[in-house]
Image (cartoon, rainbow, N blue to C red):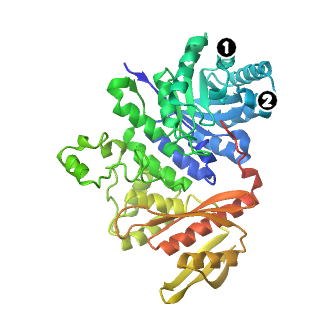
Amino acid sequence: MKDQVIFFDTTLRDGEQSPGASMNTAEKLRLATQLEKLGVDVLEAGFPAASPGDLEAVKIIAQKIRGLQVAGLARASKQDIDQAWEAVKEAAHPRIHTFIATSDIHLEHKLKMNREEVIRETVNAVKHAKAYTENVEFSAEDASRSDKDYLCRVLEAAIEAGATTVNIPDTVGYALPNEFGELIRYIRQHTPNIHRAVLSVHCHNDLGLATANTLAGIQAGARQAEVTVNGIGERAGNTSLEEVVMTLYTHRDHMGLSTRINTQEIYPTSRLVSMISGIVVQPNKAVVGANAFAHEAGIHQDGVLKHTLTYEIMEPMTIGLDTNRLVLGKHSGRHAFRDKLVDLGYELGEEDVDHLFRKFKMLADKRKEVLDEDIEALVAEEILRVPDTYKLDYLNVVSGTGTVPTATIKLRIDENEAQSAGFGVGPIDATFNTIAKMTGTRSKLLRFSVSSISGGMDALGEVTVRLEEDGLVVLGKGADQDIFTASAKAYINGLNRLEYLKKNPSLHPDERRL
């Protein structure tokens, strides 16, 4: 039987540390449901000690997601570990994941501790976690820049204290693949009790080497890969789940390694993560990018038409690209619509289903095709959102080569109607200027992006904005057939998120690194 690589997905924890990518509880639960469908082995649902909101989100996921292990991250402190256990204790398969730094630069400048003190803290933390559950993971933060022999001492102590998984992070994305592979081999040869634990790797992408380093670690004997969907994460991101999975899949005969991942769920999961996080997948992204299976060169087109393997090492249907079909239209009934929501992983109340069904019918009257992505966008726009301080009632935009771009807008602000008009250098600028004036926001627009949710001239347009105010960075998302309306919705969604965070300061996630 082939060796199995365990996939530890940290999209909901490390991935959420992408600037502005914070998710609300409903979004996290929706994504956790899809990750279960994808077949990940371990789901790191969050950092419970970061905020009461994060603890509650992890707890809800632990209660509802039953087909995999649910992990909570904790620093090597009793308080953090207690909160992690409080969050995951109702999971079918709970895991506590505790960490402390082991590199001299972290010990000196961050922890202000010596090596022996770190070993004691490691042992105390693992033992405390072990009192709650047999399933304890220990991570040596900044392992790739740590002294090898000292690192092996720390890992030996962690395993002796009860850790069943030990993780080797390349925290700052510094390692080279050959060096990282050699580090894993060294650990296996010089840690006497390493056979009693699963050896894991967690790589960051600062030099674009996260996937290469992870694969080097696996080839050297690691059997758990810590990854995120689309490679999202702080700074340059994390190891990309889809890249590692499809490398193992494509080279399965040579590498002799298996996974539990249902590869046909890769593309739908990638799409969902992009929609929820607001981080658009670059067109040339490996495996899931829009151009991954596109061929423009005549020689390539000729070759693919003759035999796909001439220029495609993977078939599109392997990652789920053949799964989007027209299944609903304007003649579809409420029962069929509700079944589709369930199939997509949404368990909604009758009031939400009724609301969405009305919106669906309005969309179906305008569209020839209603695809899964369209329904996902409806749910994200109408259900998976923070409470509305501002709501768009009316938008009229006038623009052209011979006129000054003008936007006339009616908003509902805390249920009170307000109407105004304004100008700009373009129609979207006019729209944003008018909304900013009406809401009195002091936020800055950091990013604006537009993408098509599905194909065709009548496709829904999806707009993502990133806003910043007083150190708070949020994403706003909006979808509509009219790109100006989608832009207004996205801007207003971002302003609502800012208002929600300002009114709930306990929900601000602390930045935690691994």
Instruction: Give the SS element for disc 2.
Output: helix
Q: Amino acid at mark 2?
A: Glu
Q: Residues within 10 Å of mark 1 (few under 14, many from 20)?
A: some
- Quadrant the C terminus occupies: top right
Furthest-bottom residue in this view = 402
| Residue found at the far right of this picture | 112
- With respect to residue 19, does 430 lie above or below? below
Is 163 situated above or below 63?
above
Measuring 71% from the left and 57% from the top, which residue is drawn there?
A: 472
Mark closest to the chain's N terminus, 1 or 2: 2
**Quick check: 426 above or below 279?**
below
Q: Is residue 351 visible?
A: no
Q: Nearer the viewer, residue 514 or 34?
A: 514
Most extreme residue toward the top, as rendered?
192
Residue under circle 2? 108
Q: In the image, what residue occupies the spot 50% across and 53% down? A: 274
